[in-house]
Image (tube, helix red, strand yellow):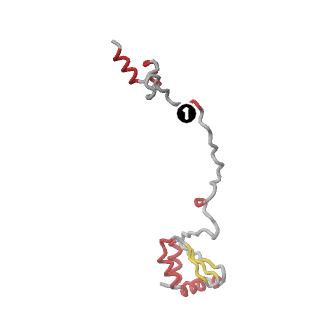
Amino acid sequence: MDGLSLLRQAHDAGLKVILLDGVLKIRGPRKHAALSRLLINRKAEIVAAFAQFEPSLSGPGTETPEIPANNKVSVPPRAGQVPAAHRLIGNGFPPIPTTIPPDSICVMPLPVCPRCSSRPVLPELRSMTGGLCYSCWTAEARAQP
């Protein structure tokens, strides 16, 4: 496999190969580490491929040449350019203000039974039990003949 086919394979895998002042830099997903090591081990062929593809690419600041494959060219993001999905601060929308819920929907504590002072008086039974908890009300109802 020659240097140009290695560059094409790296480009298809999503790796960005940069030749800067004779230093070969490879950026991309870690899952392609084996391909990156292969590129580094065959650096001479890669540098020759850069020079073969376009002689002006052998100077400083050269990047992977665009190699069309089936007329579909994928361009990796430029250095220093952060995609919108990876933004660290903010999303372009103003923050949602927090509001205090109205008192009408807040949970109110249940009143305690005046006789036993331990169980709550359920609101749906308050009128039937006369303000007592269900246990005290049933005990009072059993005690009356």
Res. 105 image quadrant: top right
Front-lying residue, 95 or 50:
95
Give the x, y percent position of residue 99.
62, 39
Q: Residue furthest top?
A: 145
Q: Is residue 85 placed above or below 9 in the rendered structure?
A: above
**Residue visible at 64% across and 83% down?**
21
Give the x, y percent position of residue 118.
44, 29
Label tally: 1
Q: Amino acid at mark 1?
A: Cys
Q: Is residue 122 placed above or below 60 in the rendered structure?
A: above
Viewed as shown, does residue 87 lie left or right of 114?
right
In this figure, which residue is indicated by the disc labeled 1?
106
Give the x, y percent position of residue 45.
54, 86
Front-lying residue, 44 or 86:
86
Give the x, y percent position of residue 47.
58, 85
Q: Residues within 10 Å of mark 1 (few under 14, many from 20)?
A: few
- The answer to whether residue 125 is seen in the rendering is no
- The answer to whether residue 112 is seen in the rendering is yes
Quadrant location of the C terminus?
top left
Local secondary structure at mark 1: loop
Q: Residue furthest front?
A: 116
